[in-house]
Amino acid sequence: MYKMWAVPGISSSSWSFLLVLCLVLKISVLSRGGITSSYVRKLQKSVDMPLDSDVFRVPPGYNAPQQVHITQGDLVGKAVIVSWVTTDEPGSNTVLYWSENSKLKLKAEGTVLRYKFYTYTSGYIHNCTLENLKFNTKYYYQVGIGNTTRTFWFTTPPEIGPDVPYTFGLIGDLGQTYDSNMTLTHYEQNPAKGQAVLYVGDLSYADKYPNHDNERWDTWGRFMERSVAYQPWFWSAGNHDIDFAPEIDETDLFKPYTNRYPTPNQASNSSSPLYYAIKRASAYVIVLSSYTACGKFTPQYIWLDNELKKVNRSETPWLIVIMHAPLYNSYEAHFMEGETMRVVFEPFFVENKVDFVFAGHLHAYERSHRISNINYEIVNKDCTPVRNQSSPVYIIFGDGGNIEGLNLDMREPQPDHSAFREASFGHAILEIKNRTHAYYHWHRNQDGYAVKAESKWFYNRYWHPVDED
Ligand SMILES: *[C@@H]1O[C@H](CO)[C@@H](O)[C@H](O)[C@H]1NC(C)=O
Ligand SMILES: *[C@@H]1O[C@H](CO)[C@@H](O)[C@H](O)[C@H]1NC(C)=O
Ligand SMILES: *[C@@H]1O[C@H](CO)[C@@H](O)[C@H](O)[C@H]1NC(C)=O
Ligand SMILES: *[C@@H]1O[C@H](CO)[C@@H](O)[C@H](O)[C@H]1NC(C)=O
Ligand SMILES: *[C@@H]1O[C@H](CO)[C@@H](O)[C@H](O)[C@H]1NC(C)=O
Ligand SMILES: *[C@@H]1O[C@H](CO)[C@@H](O)[C@H](O)[C@H]1NC(C)=O
Ligand SMILES: *[C@@H]1O[C@H](CO)[C@@H](O)[C@H](O)[C@H]1NC(C)=O
Ligand SMILES: [Fe+2]
């Protein structure tokens, strides 16, 4: 090899010049694809917080409501579903609520259920929908009427409109480790903290325990209450929420998840709690299920096809899709697991100019360029993703910090469609400003809550489809 250096007629200084030139070219070629962050992550194992941790404490008092959480209860944001668990006796299904500026206490009646999972029997799981709320209003609500009451509050979203600003927190694959607690804390303390959270699946990771120990669904519920009782989280289901365990005769899919986390699926005419849509401020959010059939003629396909026709970008300019398994991912972990859904649903996303597709599953962070891969037909050779300004940006933030730890191994070289990737835990924020502009930022945990690891302005695909790069 070194003989090359002695080619007659070319001085060694010309060679070093060529070498430098090659390096420069190589760097610029690589950077067309994107950036792989060189940030050095801490590599300790992620461990679950022990059962006696402060975050899992049972609230005091006889039959005290615990695991209180809320989510949107209708299509437009004038209803809220309140859920909570009591353990000593069923207690009351009533929620008392009142707006900040009113002494008038209103009452809503809910329902209660229990479920069994192998040798585990759940507490009394209540859910109650508060309806006909006023937009943009702070409400207090009280649960546990009769024995031990607890009071919480939330603020309803502003009325839907094309230029209504709104901020979403973006979190996924959280689990219940010390890292999960750090992610949640950083989200809560972020000066730009969201008004609601889009959650991309994999909640408690209870299925990592023998017989899917459902006590870990209860601890997760208690851990999360400090955020989810005060602002709605929009749930989507991950693989760790399936809880399919034929070895112990548990074959009812998503049993703990669907019994504990009701969604407003009927408001968007969905027959399954696993996929649904909501409008909020200037956004239309479509929640899909990576673990429910999506082929042509399946209920999810028919529903999505129908749902996309209802989107009116003059009313809700921002069209956001969330799911668990990413359609584009350049890490080794879960590589191409989203292909089944991509092949079927990606043409919908591009034709409808979806702004963002958010996913989790990968325990790391990755953001794509605007790309599509919809031209391939089995007889042609068009099977490479291409830049397309009609396409969504695909962002993976399954980096909440669960017991499985980080996915560190990336595929090399970084493919052209990948804009930025880094294997750190963290959370992200999407600040919608008006119909054209949204400011997005991702925060890795190690930097502290106020520091952005990356940030970017995004432009609406319907109103201002300008290339952000
Ligand atoms: C809890 O409330 C119910 C109904 O209000 C009542 O029947 C029951 O005696 C109460 N239990 C205790 C321990 O106070
Ligand atoms: C979790 O985070 C909260 C808020 O930062 C803190 O008060 C609490 O002690 C933490 N708990 C554990 C077990 O790390
Ligand atoms: C929630 O309450 C509704 C009735 O309001 C009921 O149909 C549904 O089964 C309940 N879901 C859960 C998960 O408790
Ligand atoms: C609801 O979905 C069914 C198919 O599941 C469809 O026939 C019906 O037209 C839909 N209704 C609305 C209002 O979208
Ligand atoms: C779309 O929304 C705008 C603004 O709310 C409204 O004026 C228009 O009639 C809607 N279009 C359709 C087809 O419903
Ligand atoms: C880009 O998206 C548009 C809109 O769906 C589509 O018509 C076009 O074929 C796509 N272009 C490429 C190169 O994929
Ligand atoms: C939309 O928001 C962006 C960012 O805040 C701002 O620069 C722009 O002027 C706004 N557009 C309108 C029409 O107000
Ligand atoms: Fe997952």
Image (spheres, grey):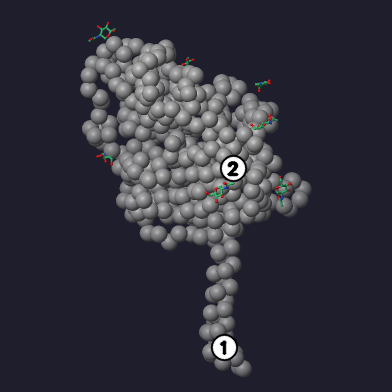
Give the CA separation, mark 1 to mark 2: 54 Å
* Residue 291, quarter of the rendered image: top right
Q: Residue at x 62, y 34 (%)?
A: 315
| The C terminus sits in image quarter | bottom right
Q: 10 Å neighbourhood of mark 1: few (<14), some, or many (≥20)?
A: few
The answer, for residue 326, to whether it is visible in the render is no
In this view of the protein, which residue sits in the foreground, 72 or 303? 72
Q: Is residue 127 left or right of residue 21?
A: left
Instruction: Give the residue at mark 2.
Output: 435
What secondary structure is marked by label 1?
helix
Q: Residue at x 58, y 73 (%)?
A: 25
| Position in image of residue 36 (x %, y %) | 48, 59
Does label 1 point to a residue whose CB lies under 8 Å from ligand 6? no
In this view of the protein, which residue sits in the foreground, 173 or 119? 173
Q: Is residue 22 above or below residue 293?
A: below
Q: Residue at x 56, y 31 (%)?
A: 160
The answer, for residue 196, to whether it is visible in the render is yes
Q: Are marks 1 and 2 in contact (CB under 8 Å)?
A: no
Instruction: Give the residue at mark 1.
Output: 14
Q: 10 Å neighbourhood of mark 2: few (<14), some, or many (≥20)?
A: many
| Position in image of residue 370 (x %, y %) | 61, 51
Foreground label between 1 and 2: 2
Q: Quadrant of ligand 2?
A: top left
What secondary structure is marked by label 2?
loop
Q: Residue at x 42, y 13 (%)?
A: 108
* Amino acid bearing label 2: Arg
In this view of the protein, which residue sits in the foreground, 138 or 233? 138
In this view of the protein, which residue sits in the foreground, 22 or 235? 235
Q: Is residue 88 above or below residue 18?
A: above
| The N terminus sits in image quarter | bottom right
First-in-chain label (1 vs 2): 1
| Position in image of residue 433 (x %, y %) | 52, 44
